[in-house]
């Protein structure tokens, strides 16, 4: 039931119809209540009218917010490095936009998920980049059917993820990140994790590649989401 209701909220046609119905209800309520409110004191009448107006306005705003809200999901293999780094970078880009679009950014792995937190080197690279440990609370998530259904746009890090056995992603909203941005190739997996200089360098380069890609082409993602 929840998924059906969310689908109705997000569908432009249905949300427009609902908004129209609320407006019509407001006009009808005013037409019906106007003569009846005159029997009360002016203060009571005005308060009742204002209460009705505020309630209808609030419902219309809720519909508008749901209508504009979109979901972007970055996908990698294990859910511990490329996708959370891309999520952290994209969230910073969204935070810098005015007005700020209503967009949910998620990170997920195709699995198996073998860790309960982001890779050490991924955290290190993002902390170095933004001078803040943005991935300290990241918990790797499996890309479930529910997440796929919620997504408006799914961007995977490399071509191999599209053909992973047992994982079928919807072709109408799933793309390889670089190809979606009009480029060629993949964002290579920096795995395995580690704390040695060579591993940190590898993860730092991956984080920087993601930042350059997303910063230079973020308008394409925003346009695709129509936010």
Image: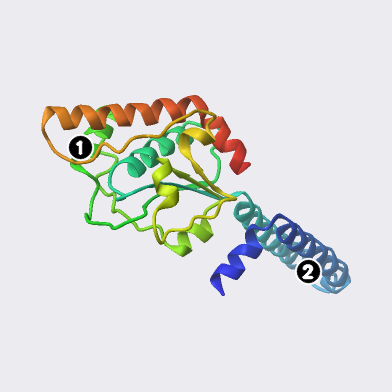
Q: Residues within 10 Å of mark 2 (few under 14, many from 20)?
A: few
Depth order, front residue of 31/144: 144
Nearest to N terminus: mark 2 or mark 1? 2
Residue visible at 63% across and 41% down? 226
Quadrant of the snapshot with the N terminus: bottom right
Residue 121's disc number: 1
In this picture, residue 180 sits left or right of residue 58: left
In this picture, residue 43 sits left or right of residue 207: right
Q: Secondary structure at mark 2?
A: loop
Query: Could you tell me if residue 210 is visible in this image?
Result: yes
User: For residue 142, which quarter of the picture?
Assistant: bottom left
In this picture, residue 164 sits left or right of residue 25: left
**CA–CA distance between discs 2 and 1?**
69 Å
Quadrant of the snapshot with the C terminus: top right
| Relative vertical location of residue 102 with respect to residue 196 in this rendering, above or below | below
User: For residue 6, which quarter of the picture?
Assistant: bottom right
Q: Secondary structure at mark 1?
A: helix
Rendered location of residue 8, percent (x, y): 66, 64
In this picture, residue 115 sits left or right of residue 98: left
Rendered location of residue 143, percent (x, y): 40, 57
Q: Of discs 2 and 1, which sits in the foreground?
A: 1
Query: Could you tell me if residue 106 is visible in this image?
Result: no
Give the residue at mark 2: 41
| Relative vertical location of residue 214 with respect to residue 17 in this rendering, above or below | above
Rendered location of residue 144, percent (x, y): 42, 62
């Amino acid at each position: 039931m929840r998924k059906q209701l969310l689908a109705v909220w997000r569908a432009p046609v249905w949300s427009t119809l609902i908004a129209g119905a609320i407006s019509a209800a407001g006009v009808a309520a005013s037409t019906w209540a106007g003569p009846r409110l005159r029997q009360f004191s002016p203060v009571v009448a005005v308060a009742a009218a204002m209460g009705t107006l505020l309630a209808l306005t609030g419902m219309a705003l809720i519909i508008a917010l749901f209508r504009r809200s979109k979901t972007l999901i970055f996908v990698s293999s294990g859910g511990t490095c490329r996708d959370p780094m891309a999520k952290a970078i994209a969230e910073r880009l969204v935070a810098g936009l005015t007005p700020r679009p209503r967009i949910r950014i998620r990170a997920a792995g195709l699995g198996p998920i073998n860790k309960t937190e982001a890779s050490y080197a991924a955290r290190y690279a993002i902390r170095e980049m933004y001078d803040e440990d943005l991935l300290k609370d990241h918990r790797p998530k499996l890309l479930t059917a529910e997440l796929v259904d919620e997504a408006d746009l799914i961007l995977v890090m490399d071509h191999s993820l599209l053909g992973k056995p047992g994982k079928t992603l919807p072709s109408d909203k799933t793309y390889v990140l670089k190809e979606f941005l009009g480029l060629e190739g993949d964002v290579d997996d920096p795995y395995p994790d580690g704390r040695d200089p060579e591993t940190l360098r590898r993860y730092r380069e991956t984080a920087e590649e993601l930042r350059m890609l997303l910063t230079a082409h973020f308008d394409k993602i925003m346009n695709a989401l129509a936010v």
